[in-house]
Amino acid sequence: MVSEAPPFWWRKAGWEAWALSPFSYLYGRVAGRRMKTARRASVPVPVICIGNFTVGGAGKTPTAIAIARAALDRGLKPGFLSRGYGGTLDVTTLVDPDHHRSAAVGDEPLLLAREATTVISRRRIEGAERLVREGVDLIVMDDGFQSARLTLDYALLVIDTRRGIGNGHLVPSGPVRAPLGEQIRQASALLKVGDGQEADAIIRTAARAAKPVFVSSTQPRPLPGIAGKRVLAFAGIADPTKFYRTAEALNAEIVLRRSFPDHHQFSDDELADLMEEAKKQDLMPLTTAKDAVRLSGKTGPAAELLWMSQVVEIDMVFDDPQAASTMIDTAFENCRARRLRQK
């Protein structure tokens, strides 16, 4: 899967998209067939998958965390299942945030592991079975909706209302991961994030298909002393502009913006340049939690920049306080029905 979305994906389709359309047609045929005909294994606990329609960030990880926290509040033991994108380990691994580094397990698994038991695995069924052995009673899968080889009891598709589905074309002409009709058919519900209008058309399509639509927003945690502060904001995430808007919502004065590819592992030279720019203009470095975990545990420039930086943490907040509980209840009901059919 493409890790850095080309800018033309997020504009009205132009010559680039149409030139690649034959490849998108073939990609869509294969992706749609795989979703329709996938043979899926199952585990004895409910599985909630948090996915999105497109390549790139829509808020999956904070959504997964919000659902796991709701499960913890109910006395459940949730566990996260992640592919470990951006990491080098290719074996099923129980993530230890005090031991592992992002270069090995990926940045998102380290964020998840701060909240609950987390396993990374390129083979989802092996990862799910490991979580069951760890005693979890609810699996929250971060991504993997279009390629799932694991039976899903609830599939929530997250969509950013400012970006929507970009130009609406399939990879490589656009950011869409699989034919929209098949994605909506297999989804349990949609979660619209924010107050933009770019997702309105697909939300209406989902509503016509009788799919529930939940509403949420990302909210930054309070960051004392940041209001009015002149900052150098840097981010290596799928949509850095979202981070910059969050920084502005905290009333930081962004003097310099520095954007990097999603899951970017910073070189010493890049880190030194960021620190030099910040010091030259007397700016405070400001970054995301995802970038911070990629800097943590290191020495030299990474440790120095992390020490200098303020880190913005965000939470996914549902408009309906019972939304996460509704999803969890439905997943348990579907799991019970599935297990009865298997007897």
Image (cartoon, rainbow, N blue to C red):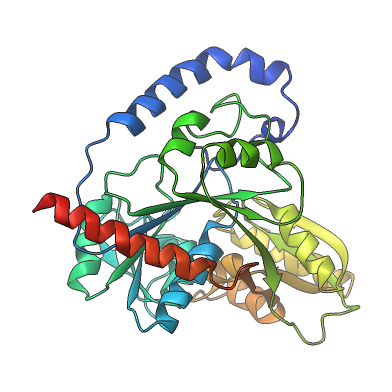
**Residue furthest bottom as drawn:** 224
Q: Quadrant of residue 112?
A: bottom left
Q: Nearer the viewer, residue 112 or 267?
A: 112
Q: Position of residue 318 (x, y in %)?
A: 61, 67
Q: Which residue does the image show at 46% across and 66% down from the upper left?
A: 326
Q: Position of residue 275 (x, y in %)?
A: 74, 69
Query: Is residue 289 in view from this perspective?
Result: yes
Question: Height in image: 30 above or below 312?
Answer: above
Q: Nearer the viewer, residue 230 or 53?
A: 53
Q: Position of residue 184 (x, y in %)?
A: 49, 38
Q: Position of residue 205 (x, y in %)?
A: 60, 35
Is 67 displayed left or right of 234 in the figure? left
Q: Which residue does the image show at 69% across and 79% down from the upper left?
A: 221
Question: Height in image: 38 above or below 305?
Answer: above
Is 91 displayed left or right of 329 in the figure? left
Query: Is residue 54 in view from this perspective?
Result: no
Q: Quadrant of residue 116?
A: bottom left
Q: Which residue does the image show at 36% across and 40% down from the upper left?
A: 147
